[in-house]
Image: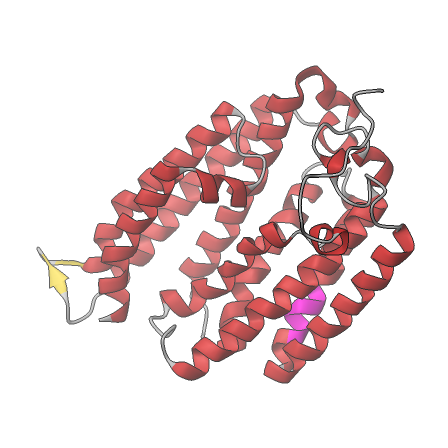
Amino acid sequence: MSDLTPTPAASRLPAALRAMRPRQWVKNVLVLAAPVAAGSLFQVPVLVSTAWAFLAFCLISASIYLVNDVRDVEADRQHPKKRLRPIAAGELSVRTALILAAACLIASLVLSWLVTPLLALTVAVYWLLQVGYSLFLKNEPIIDLAMVASGFLLRAVAGGVASGIELSQWFLLVAAFGSLFMVAGKRYSEISELGAEAGTRASLARYTATYLRFVWTLACTAVILSYSLWAFEQRGEREWLGLPWAAFSIAPFTLALLRYAYVIDRGDAGEPEDVVLTDRVLQVLAVVWVVPLGIGVFT
């Protein structure tokens, strides 16, 4: 048997649910970013609206993953890991996948509309951009990076839209360049993982590792600068050594980004959620970062 023959993934989850990629829904916690930055997350109306936004993005993300896997089914069967996805492995038919994608899309739009029409508009724009990427723009250099990064950015924006929080310029800059950092890092890791075979994938064939390193380095620098300028502006009643508490979160935030960059440089940053869920050092830095940030924002 060829080593490219699809083998069903060992999982007790139904094929339809696995095709919706629930593991990747962790990305949707980005909807919490705006309420956290504004110090409003624990206000009941904000918390409820944000929770509904999270669910809406889980559904819309599932719809996009299904459409993407239908579009790439033949290419995925040639990939060492993606060949195990339910559609590529033949566990879920293309017809069933498309019906499920439509159901998730409708459910997400209805739910987000009930929260606020602006959230429904944000979700619709997200779906159009990501499906447009999957169907038409996946193989366009630079554009593909921007399209995927826009998915992370719109998640962060959706949290503010759902809860009626005004988004600052610093928040938007951190979200935008942070998204680009993760996407370029993922592409870099894919090139490192596939090696000579990277040229056989249209989405990677036009990139070099040197160029992608430049992109994620530039994005990382912009994130650190933007976050630092935002943190120094968060002056309130609670300060220490003449500095706002949020300023003390800059060091662990920077170290966390450098840790993520280290994972990228090793070629192990294939999926952001996998890095976050498995890297213990990154998790510890996240906890250390949250403490001064929480004191500065919520007190």
Confirm whether residue 164 shows in the render: no
Q: Residue furthest left?
A: 241
Rendered residue at 33%/71% (across/down): 39
Q: Position of residue 238 (x, y in %)?
A: 15, 67
Q: Is residue 287 above or below residue 192?
A: below
- Quarter of the image that includes the C terminus: bottom left
Confirm whether residue 188 shows in the render: yes
Q: Position of residue 52 (x, y in %)?
A: 56, 75
Q: Position of residue 63 (x, y in %)?
A: 74, 60
Q: Residue furthest front?
A: 12
Q: Residue furthest right?
A: 95
Res 240 quadrant in image? bottom left
Res 262 quadrant in image? top left
How many dots with numbers?
0
What secondary structure characterizes most of the magenta part? helix
**Horizontal relation, residue 254 to residue 97: left or right:** left
Nearest the viewer among 256 and 136 is 256
Rendered residue at 50%/73% (across/down): 50
**Horizontal relation, residue 152 to residue 142: left or right:** left
**Horizontal relation, residue 128 to residue 243: left or right:** right
Rendered residue at 21%/66% (across/down): 235
Res 243 quadrant in image? bottom left
Q: Which residues are magenta?
A: 120-126
Q: Position of residue 103 (x, y in %)?
A: 79, 69
Nearest the viewer among 77 and 155 is 77
Nearest the viewer among 227 and 46 is 46
- Quarter of the image that includes the N terminus: top right
Rendered residue at 55%/54% (across/down): 27
Q: Is residue 243 magenta?
A: no
Q: Is residue 125 magenta?
A: yes
Nearest the viewer among 11 and 216 is 11
